[in-house]
């Protein structure tokens, strides 16, 4: 079962992610970011949008994914929490996301950073710690 937790961090939010596998980690990062950003309006979700991101390695790919979601949220004024991972490699992600209007904004996230980024895998799954500038 995937999970996430927010930890206090001065001027930033530290996000801990735990998932059964790498694809679940990206899906959990999507849900965690949506939870941090706000509450969705009581409306039907929009159309699915295809998104592709790349990174030099798995860690950079995770940061690129979160930053893509932050940018789309800012531009589209939608909260993205629904995600379907189509393909995931160590350096690329192809997925579909679906957004919903905001009912309430909670936290303005500027970007995910490489600072303090830590990703590990063990028999229990894939785990990451990610710092978000707020």
Image (cartoon, rainbow, N blue to C red):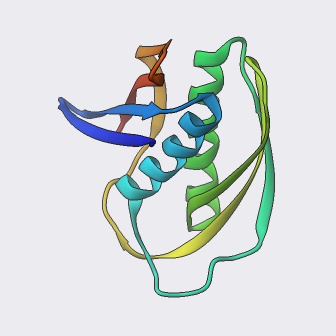
At x 41%, y 46%, the residue is 109
Q: Relative to 36, is 47 on the left or the right?
A: right
Is 80 above or below relative to 63? below
At x 28%, y 33%, the residue is 12
Instruction: Report the quarter where the N terminus lies.
Output: top left
Is 12 above or below relative to 117? below
User: Looking at the picture, how far across and down is residue 9, in whole percent?
Assistant: 20, 29
Instruction: Report the quarter where the C terminus lies.
Output: top left
At x 48%, y 52%, the residue is 31
User: Looking at the picture, how far across and down is residue 123, in whole percent?
Assistant: 48, 16
Is 22 above or below relative to 44? above
Determine the residue located farthest toward the front in the rendered image.
123
User: Looking at the picture, how far across and down is residue 127, in whole percent?
Assistant: 44, 23
Is 102 above or below relative to 76? below
Q: How many marks?
A: 0
At x 65%, y 35%, the residue is 23
The one of 73 and 3 positioned closer to us in this rendering: 3
The one of 75 and 90 positioned closer to us in this rendering: 90
- Res. 134 in view: no
Q: Relative to 127, is 23 on the left or the right?
A: right
The one of 42 and 27 positioned closer to us in this rendering: 27
Q: Relative to 8, is 84 on the left or the right?
A: right
The quarter of the picture where residue 59 lies is: top right
- Res. 79 in view: yes
Determine the residue located farthest toward the bottom in the rendered image.
43
User: Looking at the picture, how far across and down is residue 30, in whole percent?
Assistant: 54, 48
């Amino acid at each position: 079962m995937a999970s996430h937790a927010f930890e206090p961090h001065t001027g930033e939010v530290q996000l801990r992610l735990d998932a059964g596998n790498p694809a679940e980690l990206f899906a959990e990062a999507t849900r965690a970011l949506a939870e941090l950003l706000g509450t969705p309006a009581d409306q039907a979700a929009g159309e699915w949008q295809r998104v592709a991101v790349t990174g030099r390695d798995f860690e950079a790919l995770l940061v690129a994914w979160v930053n893509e979601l932050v940018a789309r949220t800012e531009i589209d004024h939608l909260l993205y929490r629904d995600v379907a991972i189509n393909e995931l490699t160590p350096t690329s992600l192809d997925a579909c996301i679906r957004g919903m209007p905001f009912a309430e904004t909670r936290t303005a996230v500027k970007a995910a950073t490489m600072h303090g980024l830590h990703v590990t895998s063990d028999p229990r799954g894939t785990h990451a710690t990610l710092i978000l500038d707020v």
